[in-house]
Amino acid sequence: MQETKHVVVVDDHDDVRDSVREYLEHQGYRVSAADGGTSLRRILERQTVDLIVLDVMMPGEDGITLCRQVRASADIPIIFLTAMAEDTDRIVGLELGADDYLVKPFNPRELLARIRAVLRRAANPASARSILDRRTVRIGPWKVDLGRQEILGEDGVGIALSTAEFRLLKVFIEQPGIILSREQLLDLTVGMTADVFDRSIDNQVSRLRKKIEENPKKPSIIKTHWGGGYSLCTEVEFE
């Protein structure tokens, strides 16, 4: 029987804690709720925790502080909940070692998808390593040659990718099926040098689609989610 994963939801708002806890419990998780650092530490001292959903903006000890404390003593996966205006805190959190983040308000189904993805990576350290440890990855009909930064068609003919296109494709391969917002894609491809309002990510996706989609105007590999970003919608096989 598969072990029930224990998730801790840390948020100072009762309605957020209760709604997330109720939703995750219905999805089969064991969930503890904490309203701040004191209650989180009490849970960590007494129980085994598989993942923490951590709000950034809280009175007293904020999420950045708590993330730093957790990372100093444990390697528990952390997903940040952030407000739209908290771009700096969000980037700092990722640099501290947070595994993912979600902007408020959010769809609980997206939070569930991110929790599942992070737990899968935590359960399989080999697959969580950088894909640069592997030479070839298959996505749909394509082979991605990681050493040469190119894609290979069924005829074995290579198509070179620019550095920006390769970084973007790498991010999608590492998180298949996960909807990634423009802000997340910018963070993961160019980091703090990015302007979070820069829509150049759309142009990069468009260029990449022209190289890997049979019909770029009706993409089936990298799909658009209006208001939500993009996702890789095909199987990923590491070779």
Image (tube, rainbow, N blue to C red):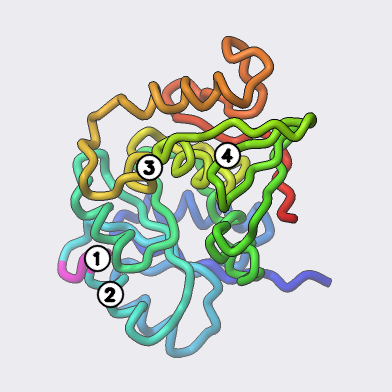
Q: CA distance from mark 4 to mark 1?
A: 38 Å
Q: Identify the amino acid type marked 2.
A: Arg
- Front position among marks 3 and 4: 4
Reading the image, the residue beneath label 4 is 150
Q: CA distance from mark 1 to mark 3?
A: 18 Å
Reading the image, the residue beneath label 2 is 68
Considering the numbered disc 4 on the image, is that residue within a helix, a strand or a loop? strand
Q: Quadrant of residue 83?
A: top left
- Residue at 44% from the left image edge and 44% from the top image edge: 167
In this view, 228 is above or below 44: above
- Front position among marks 4 and 1: 4
**Sequence order check, earlier mark of 4 and 2:** 2
Q: Quadrant of residue 56?
A: bottom left
Q: Residue furthest left?
A: 60
- Residue at 62% from the left image edge and 19% from the top image edge: 219
Reading the image, the residue beneath label 3 is 184
- Front position among marks 4 and 2: 4
Reading the image, the residue beneath label 1 is 64
Along the viewing direction, whichever of 159 and 72 lies nearer the viewer: 159
Q: Which residues are magenta?
A: 60-64
**Sequence order check, earlier mark of 1 and 3:** 1
Q: CA distance from mark 4 to mark 2?
A: 38 Å
Q: CA distance from mark 3 to mark 4?
A: 23 Å
Badge 4: residue crowd in 10 Å (few <14, some 14–19, many ≥20) = some
Q: Is residue 121 visible?
A: yes
Look at the numbered discs 1 and 2 and tell me whether their residues touch, using CB distance below 8 Å: yes
